[in-house]
């Protein structure tokens, strides 16, 4: 029973490029959460999605960032026109039910913007 | 300051000693969780304590929660070099949907 999978594990982009981060939740999980971790800091909530719906995007920057969780396929966090300040580790977590308990985290994608 | 602040920020101990980390928060919560993160890796869930619980044990881990003081502590007994990691508390605020709010973490180093 595979855990939460994220790819790529490492991503390097130049300023102005687009970054696409993918998250495959645990089997049977339909709730996905994205968090961002800046160096030497804790995780900050970004967005919570159910299949085909954004439920809570209160932590998402208003511009350049978007997230989706289509009916088929992984959840995607998309960052357009990346800037150096976007360099961080991006973690997704999934759960079977909507919950503040038992969120299973993936290994993260480390984005470096040059 | 933000919800879920850990104290100390860094802790260095010898193998076999106990390590205590504290977490303070500001709002009412449904539960509080502790996670471990090895350098450059993902998060591993350690233990969850609900708002109506005061103490919980799991192996060498002991967590306490004092909702009147809005604080929690994580005690790791008989530490091992493999316990070296960053430890984060995460609170589940009431009326905050399904998000977790993480603190800045305590970086624990256990010297062999």
Image: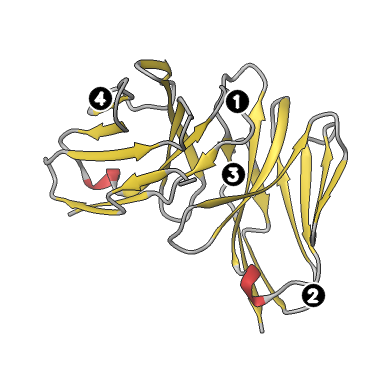
| Label 2 in the same subunit as label 3 | yes
Q: Which residue was labeled with disc 4? A: A63
- Seen at 49% across and 50% down, the residue is A41
The answer to whether the residues at label 4 and label 1 have Cβ atoms under 8 Å apart is no
Give the distance between the C-alpha atoms of the residues marked 4 and 2, in whole angstroms: 48 Å
Residue B70: quarter of image: top right
- Seen at 72% across and 32% down, the residue is B31
Q: How packed is label 1: few (under 14 Cα within 10 Å), some, or many (20 or more)?
A: some
The answer to whether the residues at label 3 and label 4 have Cβ atoms under 8 Å apart is no
Give the distance between the C-alpha atoms of the residues marked 2 and 1, in whole angstroms: 35 Å
Residue mark closest to the camera, 1 vs 3 = 1
Q: Which residue was labeled with disc 1? A: A99
Q: Which residue was labeled with disc 3? A: B103
Return the residue found at the far bottom: B112
Circle 2 SS class = loop
Query: Whole-percent x and y of residue A105?
Result: 50, 43
- Seen at 80% across and 72% down, the residue is B78
Circle 3 SS class = loop
- Seen at 56% across and 49% down, the residue is B104
Chain letter, disc 3 residue? B
Give the number of callouts: 4
If you read the primary sequence from the N terminus, does the residue marked by circle 4 or circle 1 appear first? 4
């Amino acid at each position: 029973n595979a855990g939460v999978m994220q790819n790529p594990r490492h991503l390097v982009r130049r300023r102005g490029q687009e970054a696409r981060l993918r998250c495959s939740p645990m089997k049977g999980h339909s709730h996905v959460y994205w968090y961002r971790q800046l160096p030497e800091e804790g995780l900050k909530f970004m967005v919570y999605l159910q299949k085909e719906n954004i439920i809570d995007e209160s932590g998402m920057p208003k511009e350049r960032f978007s997230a989706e969780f289509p009916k088929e396929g992984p959840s995607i966090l998309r960052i357009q026109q990346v800037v150096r300040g976007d360099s961080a580790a991006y973690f997704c977590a999934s759960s079977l039910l909507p919950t503040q308990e038992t969120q299973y985290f993936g290994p993260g994608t480390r984005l470096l913007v040059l | 300051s933000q919800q879920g602040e850990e104290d100390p920020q860094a802790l260095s101990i010898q193998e076999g000693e106990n390590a205590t980390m504290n977490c303070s928060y500001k709002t009412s919560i449904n539960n509080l969780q502790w996670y471990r993160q090895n350098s450059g890796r993902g998060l591993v869930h350690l233990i969850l304590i609900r708002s109506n619980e005061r103490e919980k044990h799991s192996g060498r881990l002991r967590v306490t929660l004092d909702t009147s003081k809005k604080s929690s502590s994580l005690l790791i007994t008989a530490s091992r070099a493999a316990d070296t990691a960053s430890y984060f508390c995460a609170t589940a605020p009431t009326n905050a949907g399904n998000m977790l709010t993480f603190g800045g973490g305590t970086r624990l180093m256990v010297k062999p």
